Image (cartoon, rainbow, N blue to C red):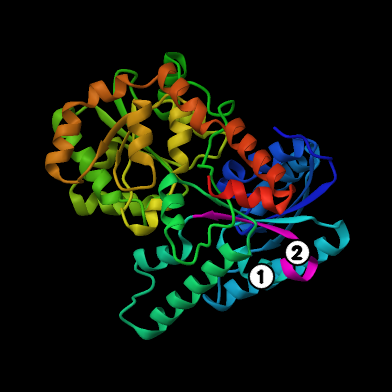
């Protein structure tokens, strides 16, 4: 890491709340790591959901205070559907300007598209450096998820408008961060990318200290908590269900697995409504007496996920998903839990194959399920310390923090050096 004087003040803006599970796993650890480097004074601005804030705000405040992070927040609004988004941006913008004036901010670090909508103008007004932490393909996801039907003019207009704004975000940024190598190669080919700013690939990482290696003792303990017999095979799923995550296909895989081995449990660790899962089970004729659905906090996930012999993650493949880095993958590999997933999602196929971390399916049909199930014992045997060691270089939180420190260091060097490195 290249040392720079500890005088740079960074305003990190996230539309995701720090009291959300995503904020706790994919935002706070980075900000804490940057603050601990002693080269940056980190001010964090987030948009919090009231129900999570009531539960976790003291914990987050104490964590930020202990690590020298100045945390500020606004609150998330859901209605009316469109106007509420603009109201959230208005509140974030107003708070950001206040912090810039008061704290002599040197750079804005915007996580996702929403903060960028107001940050490009703020950057110019206050002569700041700007990092566009691209995350997912926010605009294209609206189309791929079926939210914007491009057959209708209002949606076509919205899509074209926001794509122009997205191109402007890239032009106005000194540095860009994406989650996957596929996303980087894609953006490099865009006519709107002028090649004058670096694109760094920093995937969703995992805290390997928090997500510790599963041992037989931990697995037995988890199964006892969940009332799963010690000898039973446990398939697991971590995260929300619906939209991108193909619940129906995952349940059909489980149904096919039951035909080979009736002593199988399916564990869902999710914040989603359990009725979504049980309703789908009824539609598919699946007995859910061996399906366990648990709400799990971030601290509970490593304890309960230890029951897994293998985990599953089927995501709807689409153009926008080339920019996706599933958070659960790094967390599972850190625990030494192998996965069964599908191809055409970010860099997942290359990652799983290179790390020998499970099986990637090219199709989600009965034949593919049968072939995977025939290998299920072998797939589960891929778990353990070797998998965790293989994943350490790519997914370890410390590696991600180091990449951000390098980016920040480069950001404050001469512009000519930034430009030359951007094309490498």
| Residue 127 is one of the magenta-drawn residues | yes
**Viewer-closest of 300 and 123:** 123
Mark 2, secondary structure of its residue? helix
**Viewer-closest of 128 and 33:** 128
* Image quadrant occupied by the N terminus: top right
Residue 96's disc is: 2
**Viewer-closest of 275 and 122:** 122
Residue placed at 45% from the left, 59% from the top?
Answer: 137
Mark 1, secondary structure of its residue? helix
Is 218 situated above or below 368?
above
Q: Are marks 2 and 1 in contact (CB under 8 Å)?
A: yes
Residue placed at 62% from the left, 46% from the top?
Answer: 27
| Residue 324 is one of the magenta-drawn residues | no
Q: Residue furthest bottom?
A: 153
Going from the N terminus, do you reach mark 2 or mark 1 first? 2
Q: Residue furthest left?
A: 367
Local crowd size for mark 1, using a 10 Å CA cut-off: few (<14), some (14–19), many (≥20): some
Q: Within the image, what quadrant is residue 89 found in? A: bottom right
Residue 14's spot in the image, x, y percent? 64, 56
Q: CA distance from mark 2 to mark 1?
A: 10 Å
Residue 337's spot in the image, x, y percent? 39, 27
Residue 71's spot in the image, x, y percent? 76, 51
Is 123 situated above or below 303?
below
Would you say 320 lies left or right of 60 here?
left
Residue placed at 50% from the left, 62% from the top?
Answer: 193
Residue placed at 61% from the left, 69% from the top?
Answer: 117
**Viewer-closest of 201 and 343:** 201
Residue 238's disc is: none
Would you say 51 lies left or right of 369 here?
right
Residue 19's spot in the image, x, y percent? 64, 49
Query: Pointer 1: what residue?
Result: 118
- The stretch of residues the image draws in magenta is 123-135
């Amino acid at each position: 890491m290249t040392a720079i004087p500890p005088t740079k003040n960074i305003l990190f803006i996230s539309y995701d709340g720090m009291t959300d599970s995503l904020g706790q796993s994919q935002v706070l650890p980075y900000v804490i790591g940057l603050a601990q480097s002693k080269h940056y004074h980190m001010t964090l601005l987030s948009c919090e959901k009231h129900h999570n804030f009531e539960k976790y705000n003291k914990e987050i405040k104490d964590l930020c205070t202990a690590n020298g992070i100045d945390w500020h927040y606004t609150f998330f609004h859901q209605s009316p559907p469109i106007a509420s988004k603009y109201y959230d941006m208005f509140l974030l913008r107003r708070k950001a300007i206040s912090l810039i004036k008061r704290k002599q901010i040197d750079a804005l670090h915007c996580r996702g598209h929403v903060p960028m909508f107001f940050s490009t103008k703020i950057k110019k007004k206050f002569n700041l450096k700007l990092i566009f932490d691209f995350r997912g393909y926010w605009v294209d996801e609206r189309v791929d998820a079926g939210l914007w039907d491009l057959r209708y003019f209002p949606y076509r207009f919205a899509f074209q408008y926001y794509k122009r704004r997205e191109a402007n975000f890239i032009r106005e940024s000194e540095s860009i961060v994406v989650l996957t190598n596929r996303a980087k190669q894609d953006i490099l080919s865009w006519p709107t990318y002028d090649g004058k700013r670096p694109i760094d690939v920093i995937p969703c990482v995992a805290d390997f200290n928090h997500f510790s290696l599963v041992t037989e003792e931990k697995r037995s303990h988890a199964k006892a908590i969940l009332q799963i017999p010690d000898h039973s095979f446990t398939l697991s799923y971590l995260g929300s269900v619906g939209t991108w995550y193909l619940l129906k296909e995952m349940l059909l895989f489980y149904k096919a697995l039951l035909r080979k081995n009736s002593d199988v449990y399916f564990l869902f660790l999710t914040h989603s409504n359990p009725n979504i899962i049980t309703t789908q089970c009824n539609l598919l004729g699946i007995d859910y007496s061996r399906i366990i659905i648990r709400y799990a906090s971030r601290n509970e996930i490593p304890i309960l996920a230890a029951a897994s012999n293998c985990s599953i993650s089927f995501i709807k493949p689409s153009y926008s998903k080339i920019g996706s880095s599933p958070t659960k993958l790094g967390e599972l590999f850190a625990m030494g839990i192998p996965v069964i997933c599908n191809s055409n999602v970010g860099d997942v196929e290359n990652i799983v194959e290179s790390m020998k971390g499970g099986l990637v399916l090219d199709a989600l049909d009965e034949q593919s399920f049968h072939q995977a199930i025939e290998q299920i014992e072998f797939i589960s045997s891929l778990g353990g310390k070797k998998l965790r060691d293989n994943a350490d270089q790519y997914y370890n939180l410390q590696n991600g923090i180091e990449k951000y420190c390098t980016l920040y260091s480069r950001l404050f060097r001469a512009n000519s050096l930034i430009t030359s490195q951007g094309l490498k």
